[in-house]
Image (tube, helix red, strand yellow):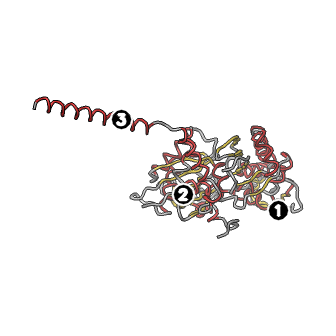
Amino acid sequence: MISMSFLTGLFSFLAFVSGSALLVMVYLDNRKVRIDDGIAKFRRHIDALSPEARRSSVHHNNPEDRWSR
Amino acid sequence: MARDLAIDLGTANTLVYMKGKGIVLNEPSVIAVNRQSGEVLATGHDAWDMIGRTPSYIVAVRPLRGGAITDFDITERMIRLLLQRVGVSRFTRPKVVICVPSAITEVERRAVTDATRRAGASDAQLIEQPMAAAIGANLPIDEPVGNMVIDIGGGTTETAVISLGGVVALEAIRVGSFDIDAAIQSYVRREHGVAIGERTAEEIKIQIGSAEPGPQDRSADIRGRDLVTGLPKTVRLTAEEVRFAIDEPVTAMVLSVKRCLAKAPPELSQDFLARGMYLVGGGGMLRGLAERIQRETQVPVNMSPQPLEAVVLGAGHCIENYQALRGMFMGTRR
């Protein structure tokens, strides 16, 4: 009886430690700056400056709009 | 909920762009204040009409010189009034993007952001005028090609080479169209012995001012005060005289463009010959200026279709795409 509860406790403890370690690893991995983060950020920046993106703001106010509405 | 705003806080004019609406305000950067009580009496066009014509207890001033705040309190009050006029209250605090000259110092930068935050903005970000101008002038700055923009404002001349969404080379001087007005005032005083106001000087510049001789050269009668007798006097001024009078500031502008061209990498220089440079800002509307820059640099110069609004439209685009273009704001890059 005593050995059973000891084993249950031990396995619970190990499961808890492993789970926590896994969570910490996942958290640290997400915090790492990935090589493609910069690429995605730069792509968003460039896309936001494209003529299509500027259509709603700049061209909207331009009477000589070359993409006339 | 207040809509976010972009403000082109220029030495000459202030323009406000509201997110989702476009340009909602465009007026001179002038404020008239009661000297005794400190009350604001007028702003914008009403205050501009008062320049040089006020009784002693009223002062009508431009709170910015050379693109920088010269009077912090007055500027803060002017921004507060601007925000109120476009619907900002103490319960609605918008994000604001403000266009400033690229040559602005750290102290001046902080003065602009502090004045804007104290006037009611929840967040104030700054963007360099040439970058905003390039976005607003529809230049293909998202491509890996050289785009050159010359922004001539009231107090500054800024030239930038932009490629792939960033500034490659930049040249800025604190010489603008107000220096042209001042040169005309100084010439008329020196050569004709007549004192004229800054509004008269500006009218002369618009009527007969030019940077290059042209078929439309005319002369104009101007009225001022005789410095010897103190009586009103009319003198005739020719376009050639005005060209001579304004040669110094115009030459300074052209030299600054040349310095920027010299800073540009050779790969981008060849793009300028094919695509030309783009001129924006009210100062760029001086007759013959594009031709003079073209003659001296041997690079074609194109006038932006909306020279006065390009800067605020570019800043407006940044406020519409705030998250994606955050990297363009001055504080986030430096």
Question: Is residue B289 visible to us here?
Answer: no
> CA separation, marks 1 and 2?
46 Å
Q: Residue at x 61, y 56 (%)?
A: B312
Mark 1–mark 2 CB contact (< 8 Å): no
Foreground tag (3 vs 2): 3
Q: Position of residue B265 (x, y in %)?
A: 75, 38
Label 3, residues with CA under 10 Å away: few <14, some 14-19, many ≥20 = few
- The residue singled out by tag 1 in the image is B220
* Chain that bears disc 1: B
Describe the element under mark 2 as helix, strand or loop. helix
> In the figure, is residue B11 to the left or right of B258?
left
Q: Residue at x 86, y 58 (%)?
A: B238
- The residue singled out by tag 2 in the image is B320
* Chain that bears disc 2: B
Q: Residue at x 53, y 63 (%)?
A: B20
- The residue singled out by tag 3 in the image is A24
Foreground tag (1 vs 2): 2
**Are the residues under badges 1 and 2 in a single subunit?**
yes
Q: Position of residue B208 (x, y in %)?
A: 81, 60
- Check residue B253 in the rendering and tell me which mark sits there, or answer none: none
Mark 3–mark 1 CB contact (< 8 Å): no
Say which of A34 and B138 sits in front. A34
Q: Position of residue B226 (x, y in %)?
A: 76, 55
Three-letter residue code for mark 2: Glu
B157 over B2 or under it: above or below: above
Mark 3–mark 2 CB contact (< 8 Å): no
> CA separation, marks 3 and 1?
79 Å
* Chain that bears disc 3: A
> CA separation, marks 3 and 2?
37 Å
Give residue A13's quadrant in the image.
top left
